Image: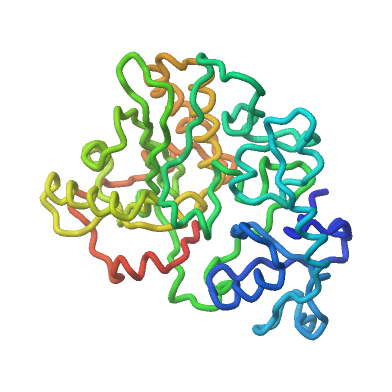
Amino acid sequence: MGRYKCAYNCESSSDSDLKFFKFPLYNPRKLKKWLNNMKWDDWTPSRFSVLCSNHFEEQYIDRTGKCVKLREDAVPTIFSSFDDTQKEKAPINPRSKQNKPSAVKASQMSPAQSQTTTPATTKPSVQDKEPSQAEEPSGDKDPKTPERWRIIVDEGLMKIESFPHFFHGDYCVPQRDIQWAPDYNVNAEGKDPENRIEVTEPWQWLGLDVRGPLPETLNGHKYMLTVTDYYSKWVEALPMQACLPEHVAEHVVDIIAHFGYPLRILSRLPHDIVQKINRELKEQLKVTVALVVHHQQTGTADLITEQLIDRMVSDLVEEHAPDWDVYLPAKVFSLCFKEHSQTKERPFSILCCKEHEPLQSPRQLNWANAKIQESAFVVR
């Protein structure tokens, strides 16, 4: 049976009687107190990071209800000494054959370390072909080895949020003995419904990402644009020669022409890039609304589909490096016509076989883009 993993790497975190609590990511003042007490340098919790109840005094734990939870003023205060903690978090050089990654668990590493280090005792269960998981060989780099690709994101968001490509921040790979913390409403644990947006129908809210740089194909493509419908799990994936706003906008216009206008499109691309994409879309579509919204939850609103896309990209890079763009349509076709593990239906059936009528004009919202950026998305 799976278990949670305390971000502090407690030896007793396998105790079935322990309770686990998520970090208050959406309360900066409270989060700062938590991190100051931990006394860890260069580490930022993800939305999947948890601390076990051993780090909290009993006065901070509310056991009166059906579920054990923390009180509003709860702050973790019980930690090992600072010197011991720093020794545990000593950096490991993945290029050295003498220093094995198994000496340090993935939950101890900073996100930057976890991208390049794979625990020796753990086998990946989802993206076992992910380029970013492979251990870097010592010596000169093989020129035939494809470059590592990544999801292009706003670096500012990386400080507070984890993304599927990096396996949820703290953890280098999805470990078999770890049960991910449940994805509750990320805004004050659901206490403020005003800041929650529910995805309730197909082609309502979409997520836009750019992956790359990938091995350059004979056609000059080095990047991949993906647009995902959070409700139906339908995926559009298109190759691009460069990650430029005009290229992204051109493909989005084609997608809208086929499927109609969504409510809005979430993207974690850098904020200035999102603004330029919106300017291009307004000019090409002759609209006045900003269709793309900068949002940090773009990749985490639908983790399963994001992992499927990442694995698809990794397979293409490994199997068809010179012409992955030629094989891309077939791979996307397979994703959209295969039963999704979450909905138990094919994305094609939900989006195209249930009387979805493409809208030929932008939909008006009751929220401003600033309000959308502050809201947490829940897929029903």
* Residue 77 versus residue 85 in the image, above or below: below
Residue 38, position in %: x, y?
A: 71, 68
Left of 340 or right of it: where is 218? left
**Quarter-of-image position of residue 217:** top left
- Residue at 27% from the left image edge and 47% from the top image edge: 357
- Residue at 42% from the left image edge and 36% from the top image edge: 211
* Residue 116 versus residue 86 in the image, above or below: above
- Residue at 64% from the left image edge and 44% from the top image edge: 114
* Residue 32 seen in this snapshot: yes
Left of 88 or right of it: where is 128? left
Between 20 and 215, the one lying in front of the other is 215
- Residue at 79% from the left image edge and 81% from the top image edge: 63
Left of 193 or right of it: where is 30? right
Residue 221, position in %: x, y?
A: 33, 24
Between 351 and 75, the one lying in front of the other is 75
Residue 113, position in %: x, y?
A: 63, 44
Left of 218 or right of it: where is 129? right
**Quarter-of-image position of residue 81:** bottom right
Between 225 and 120, the one lying in front of the other is 120
